[in-house]
Amino acid sequence: EWSEDKLEEFASHDSNGDGLLTAAEVLAAKATVAGSYQNNTAEVLPPRKTIVSEIVVDDDFVIGDLNVQLSITHTNAGSLDAYLTGPDGRRIELFTEVGGSGDHFDETIFDDQSETPVTKARPPFKGSFLPEGVLKKQPSLSQFNGTSVKGVWQLVVRGTRSDRFGMLHNWALLVEPQE
């Protein structure tokens, strides 16, 4: 059944108004949709060990803005480091040993446009923060703008000094297409 909403959506994709969707019109429509790609497989963060969690993105569109969201339970956030590695092998520093002996990253978003540096915040980290790499004048998430989202993305989390266990609950790539 064609609802009014479905008819409007179809018409918005039918750029030449001929009542048919061509492959080019479908691809153009797909490129205007923002993407959220998640890994919801929880992983234990052992003391003084490194874990690598992956998200495989099959979609192929050009990134306009990329943010990373993650949730980690750990009673000593200051003993953790986290990096994002893109499909092309570029590594971006999200944070290293921030938050002292405070607890947790609660749906924390790393965003190059955030106003709050993660190094100036305190756990539980909830909200949006500048990745630490930005503050050190290193490449950051905006380095992926203009590249394809397609490929294998890796979140690398390392326990540096603590003898405590933690848990990576989930993480996600929040992607806006380039206009």
Image (cartoon, helix red, strand yellow):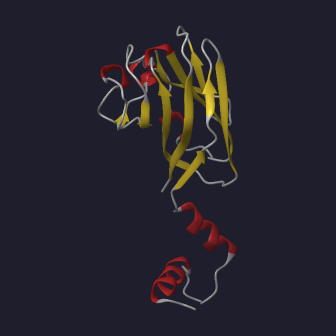
In the image, residue 9 lies at what x, y percent?
Answer: 50, 79
In the image, residue 130 lies at what x, y percent?
Answer: 38, 30
Q: Residue reaching furthest top? A: 161
Q: Look at 52% across and 34% down and name the residue there.
A: 143
Q: Is residue 113 left or right of residue 84?
A: left
In the image, residue 29 lies at what x, y percent?
Answer: 56, 69
Q: Look at 54% across and 54% down and name the residue there.
A: 35
Please tell me whether residue 23 is drawn above or below residue 68 in the rendered image: below
Choose top left, top right, bottom left or bottom right for residue 85: top right
Q: Is residue 110 left or right of residue 53?
A: left
Please tell me whether residue 79 is drawn above or below residue 8 in the rendered image: above
- Please state which of residues 124 and 27 is positioned toward the viewer in this rendering: 124
- Please state which of residues 174 and 78 is positioned toward the viewer in this rendering: 78
Q: Look at 57% across and 16% down and name the residue there.
A: 159
Please tell me whether residue 100 is drawn above or below residue 89 in the rendered image: above
| Residue 50 seen by the camera | yes
Q: Look at 61% across and 37% down and name the residue there.
A: 42
